[in-house]
Image: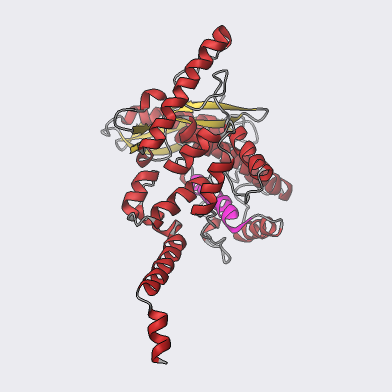
Amino acid sequence: MVTGSLQIKSNKYYCVLNLRDEKGERKQKWIPSGISISERGGKTKAHSFLLDQKALYSGLRFSPCSNISFGKYMEYYIEIKKQSVQITTYQGYKNIVDKHISPYFNKLGKNVVKVTSEDIENYYRYKLDSGLSQNTVRKHHELIHGCFSWAIKNRIINENPADYLVNMPRTQRPTVSFYNTDEIILLLTKLKDTKLFPVILVAVITGLRRSELLGLRWSSLNFETGSLSVNNKIIRTYDGKKTGIAESSQMKSDSSNRVITLNLDTVSFLKNLKIEQERNMKYYGNAYCQEYIDYIFVNARGELLKPDYISHTFKKLLIRHGLRIIRFHDLRHSCVSQMVAAGIDFKTISSFIGHSDVGFTMNTYAHISQEQNRIASEKIGKQLNVSGILSNQL
């Protein structure tokens, strides 16, 4: 492990690392943290910065041309990012780097200093030709750009080659798929007697994300008022070898922590579900899982439903019952489509589904709103017998 210490110069903290160059001679590298000694919590932040830098340079030799490959440098970068993002975000980053960025640039054989704008554009073109979407490649760009910005901060390079791209991957509005009213009714009718029905019903009624649904607890539900607190989630984890689940109170955004109100029929359904779970608890006795006893969506033995199980089983049920194939997440979009059709304003919808920006909600569901406007216009036309009036005029 590289050794180092914090030093103060011009009233700011510097990280001083003890490195060796290619000849084995000892060199000191001063890295500015940008943290003032008078800043509140500055020393703690500076210490964290020191640990980050020591982690980055461990096992590396310092040289003016920075011989570390770009692919390897990306791997170090996401490990540093891990400390400031949610675990699911980090896992997404790691997947992109391990499966795409590192293999490509390691094969290219260029270090972090030698990568050019043309190299980056060639990479994007290669990935697009391989079948990745513009939005996916855009995520790759955001990681690559961030990595080079980090290299600039650490004085490894002077400028960001990702700033000078001629052909930038474009962000495309995601296609939102959803069930209309008739399809939702058919879905609920046909799947009413399946084990997945409770989570499907609540997904349609609330528009909660899969992770939010699995994180719901009985203690968060007020049966008298119907209020339901959304402040916990269950996420899928992957350690490179096997998948698992983990509980987290760190929601997607501040707006994701919210309280929604359920309709009376849904509250009544959940009361019966709780009674059924209590019955299962007595039936299985010591074999009943106690770990998730406060959670709403568990199986007969009290084991929490897993994210992948829900998605895979949902698709199987749709196929078995001859229903149009959509993702489980599309039930969230289906819920929004019903709210739009009911004339609920976008500010209320945004708050209900946990979006941090009403503008994002409007952009995401603009086409649903336009379709509802068209339907409303047609209804007004029929109500006023406009076609009849115009035909008589002609």
Q: Main secondary structure of the magenta part?
A: helix
User: Quarter-wise, where is residue 161 in the image?
Assistant: bottom right
- Nearest the camera: 56 or 143? 143
User: In which quadrant is the C terminus drawn?
Assistant: bottom left
- Nearest the camera: 219 or 41? 219
Residue 213 visible from this viewpoint: yes
Residue 16 location (% of width, % of height): 45, 31
Residues in magenta?
133-152
Q: Is residue 291 magenta?
A: no
When the figure is inspected, residue 375 is found, relative to residue 350, above or below; the finding is below
The scheme the figure's colours follow is secondary structure
When the figure is inspected, residue 324 is found, relative to residue 81, above or below; the finding is below
User: In which quadrant is the N terminus drawn?
Assistant: top right
When the figure is inspected, residue 313 is found, relative to residue 274, above or below; the finding is below
Residue at (29% x, 35% y) in the render: 11
When the figure is inspected, residue 237 is found, relative to residue 168, above or below; the finding is above
- Nearest the camera: 319 or 114? 319
Q: Is residue 147 magenta?
A: yes
Asked whether, in this view, residue 180 is left or right of residue 65, the answer is left
Residue at (45% x, 60% y) in the render: 368
Residue 118 location (% of width, % of height): 63, 61
- Nearest the camera: 163 or 285? 285
Residue 333 location (% of width, % of height): 48, 50
Residue 69 visible from this viewpoint: no
Q: How many marks?
A: 0
Asked whether, in this view, residue 58 is left or right of residue 30, the answer is right
In the displayed orientation, state which residue is furthest to the top: 286
Residue at (39% x, 58% y) in the render: 362
Residue 87 location (% of width, % of height): 51, 33
